[in-house]
C-alpha cells in the first residue's frame, strides 16, 4: 500500500508524502504513556525515523487527539522528535524529514493541550481540523465548518468557526504560514423537529438518517449530498458564515460546496495562511457520477482557486441580479451564485476546470550546509530567489517555495500576490 502512494512522485517529483499516526479512534492513552517516559520517547522517535526511511516517506504527522492536561509532555515529544529529525538528516546527508501535527480548532481544547509557542518553533506545518464544530450531539442545526459566526447559532457563539480558531492559534504563537486550513468533504446532519423551521438554529430531534458512509446516521459524504439534491433536496448558501446547507423533508445537512470552498480559499490567501487540506478524499465525488462536475469537485475547486489570482475580499459582496425587490430578507432566490444577503437559494452552478495543477507549498529542507541561518529562528528573504524564502528553526535552514504567482514579501513575512512585488521581481 505504501509503495502505491510513494510511486505518485513519478508524476510529481516535488510531492511530499507524510505518514500520519494516531487519530480520534486511536485515543490518547498510548501517546500519553510514550510522552511521559524519556526512554519511551527515544524508542518511539527512533522507530518512527526507521519506518519513514524504510517506506520512503517525507515526514510524519502526529495526530494525538488530544493531549488534554499534557501540554508539557506533548511539547517534549515534539521538540525531541524535531531534534532527532535534524540530527538524522545531518548525519545521513538526506533531506530532513518533515514534522507536522493535526490539531483541534476549539479554544478550550487548545488551551488545555498545547504549548503553542513551542509547537510554532518545532513543527513544519500544522493541520487545523477546522470542522465538526457542530453536529447531532447538539439539539440545534448549524454549519459544522463555517468560516465565521452566523445568526441563529446556539452553541460556541462567535468561537466555533474557522476564522476564530485560526486567529487564536496565531495569537498563541503559531506562525500563519505554517497553518493549513482543514476543509471537510462531508456534511453533518440532523432530523428536524419541524419541517417548516429550517434556518440555522432550528431544533433537531436527533441525527440524520443512516447514510451509505455512516450507517449510524448524523453525517453524509459530499457525493451523497449531491444525490440528495438530485432527489429534490433544496440547497442554500450562507454567505455571512460561508457554508452551505441542504433540506430534504425532515433531513438537514450542513457542509461545504464548491462555492463556499472557493470563498474559503480566497480568505486564506488574503490572510496569509499556508494552504488547505481536505478530510477526506473518498467523501468527495471521487467517481464524478453524483455531482455532475467530474471527479473530485471539491478538491478541484480548492486547487483552482489557489491557482487563481483572485483577491476578492470575502468581506465584500459581489454583484447579483435577484428576482425579488426586497433586500432585507435573509433568504433570496437568485439567478447567479453571488448575492449580498446572507443566504441564497442556488439555481445555477459554476463550471469547473477539469485540468488543475496542485498548489500545495513544496517544503525543501536543505542538505548541510547549503544555506545558513542569519538567526536561529525566523523567516528570511533569499537573495537569489524572491519566490521562496528561508525558514530557520534551531539554526537549521529550510527553503520553502511560495505558491504560483506569489513572492516572499520580507516586510510582512508572507508569500504575497505578485502584483505587489517590485518590477524587478516580475
Image (cartoon, grey):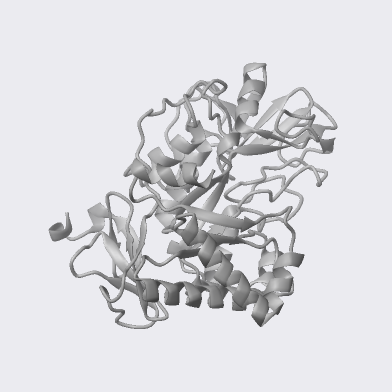
Residue 123 percent coordinates (x, y): 50, 69
Q: Is residue 115 visible?
A: no
> Which image quarter: residue 68?
bottom right
In the displayed structure image, the side of residue 376 where residue 80 appears, left or right: right
Residue beneath the point at 44% across and 73% down: 88
The answer to which of 268 and 240 lies nearer the viewer is: 268
In the displayed structure image, the side of residue 35 where residue 249 appears, left or right: right
The answer to which of 141 and 345 lies nearer the viewer is: 141
Q: In what quadrant of the picture does the C terminus appear?
A: bottom left
Residue 366 percent coordinates (x, y): 32, 68
Q: In this view, does 386 lie above or below 197?
A: below
In the displayed structure image, the side of residue 164 where residue 157 appears, left or right: right
Residue 81 percent coordinates (x, y): 54, 73
Residue 193 percent coordinates (x, y): 85, 32
Residue beneath the point at 67% across and 74% down: 35
Residue beneath the point at 55% across and 60% down: 61
> Which image quarter: residue 129?
bottom right
In the displayed structure image, the side of residue 47 where residue 403 appears, left or right: left
Q: Can residue 296 be seen in this view?
A: yes
> Which image quarter: residue 342?
top right
Q: Is residue 154 above or below residue 45?
A: above
Q: In what quadrant of the picture does the N terminus appear?
A: top right
Amino acid at each position: 500500500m505504501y509503495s502505491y502512494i510513494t510511486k505518485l512522485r513519478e508524476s510529481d517529483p516535488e510531492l511530499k508524502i507524510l505518514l500520519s499516526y494516531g487519530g480520534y479512534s486511536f485515543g490518547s492513552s498510548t501517546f500519553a504513556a510514550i510522552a511521559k517516559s524519556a526512554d519511551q520517547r527515544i524508542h518511539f522517535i527512533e522507530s518512527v525515523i526507521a519506518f519513514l526511511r524504510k517506506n520512503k516517506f517525507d515526514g510524519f504527522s502526529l495526530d494525538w487527539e488530544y493531549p488534554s492536561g499534557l501540554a508539557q509532555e506533548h511539547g517534549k515529544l515534539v521538540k525531541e522528535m524535531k531534534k532527532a529529525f535534524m540530527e538524522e538528516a545531518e548525519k545521513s546527508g538526506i533531506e530532513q524529514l518533515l514534522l507536522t501535527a493535526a490539531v483541534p480548532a476549539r479554544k478550550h481544547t487548545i488551551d488545555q493541550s498545547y504549548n503553542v509557542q513551542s509547537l510554532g518553533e518545532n513543527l513544519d506545518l500544522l493541520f487545523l481540523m477546522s470542522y465538526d464544530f457542530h453536529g447531532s450531539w447538539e439539539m440545534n442545526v448549524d454549519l459544522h465548518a463555517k468560516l465565521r459566526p452566523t445568526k441563529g447559532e446556539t452553541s460556541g457563539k462567535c468561537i466555533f468557526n474557522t476564522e476564530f480558531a485560526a486567529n487564536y492559534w496565531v495569537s498563541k504563537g503559531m506562525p500563519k504560514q505554517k497553518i493549513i486550513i482543514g476543509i471537510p468533504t462531508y456534511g453533518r446532519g440532523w432530523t428536524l423537529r419541524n419541517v417548516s423551521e429550517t434556518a440555522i438554529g432550528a431544533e433537531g430531534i436527533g441525527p440524520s438518517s443512516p447514510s451509505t458512509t455512516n450507517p449510524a446516521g448524523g453525517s453524509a459524504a459530499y457525493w451523497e449530498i449531491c444525490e440528495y439534491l438530485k432527489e429534490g433536496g433544496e440547497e442554500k448558501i450562507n454567505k455571512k458564515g460561508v457554508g452551505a446547507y441542504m433540506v430534504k423533508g425532515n433531513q438537514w445537512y450542513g457542509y461545504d460546496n464548491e462555492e463556499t470552498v472557493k470563498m474559503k480559499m480566497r480568505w486564506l490567501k488574503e490572510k496569509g495562511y499556508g494552504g488547505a487540506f481536505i478530510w477526506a478524499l473518498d467523501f468527495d465525488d471521487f467517481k464524478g457520477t453524483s455531482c455532475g462536475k467530474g471527479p473530485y469537485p471539491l478538491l478541484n475547486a480548492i486547487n483552482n482557486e489557489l491557482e487563481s489570482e483572485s483577491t476578492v475580499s470575502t468581506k465584500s459582496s459581489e454583484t447579483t441580479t435577484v428576482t425579488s425587490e426586497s433586500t432585507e430578507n435573509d433568504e433570496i432566490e437568485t439567478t447567479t451564485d453571488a448575492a449580498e444577503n446572507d443566504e441564497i437559494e442556488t439555481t445555477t452552478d459554476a463550471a469547473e476546470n477539469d485540468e488543475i495543477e496542485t498548489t500545495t507549498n513544496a517544503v525543501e529542507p536543505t542538505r548541510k550546509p547549503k544555506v545558513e541561518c542569519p538567526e536561529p529562528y525566523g523567516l528570511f528573504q533569499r537573495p537569489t530567489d524572491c519566490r521562496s524564502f528561508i525558514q530557520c528553526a534551531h539554526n537549521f535552514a529550510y527553503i520553502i517555495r511560495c505558491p504560483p504567482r506569489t513572492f516572499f514579501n520580507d516586510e510582512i513575512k508572507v508569500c504575497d500576490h505578485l502584483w505587489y512585488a517590485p518590477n524587478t521581481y516580475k
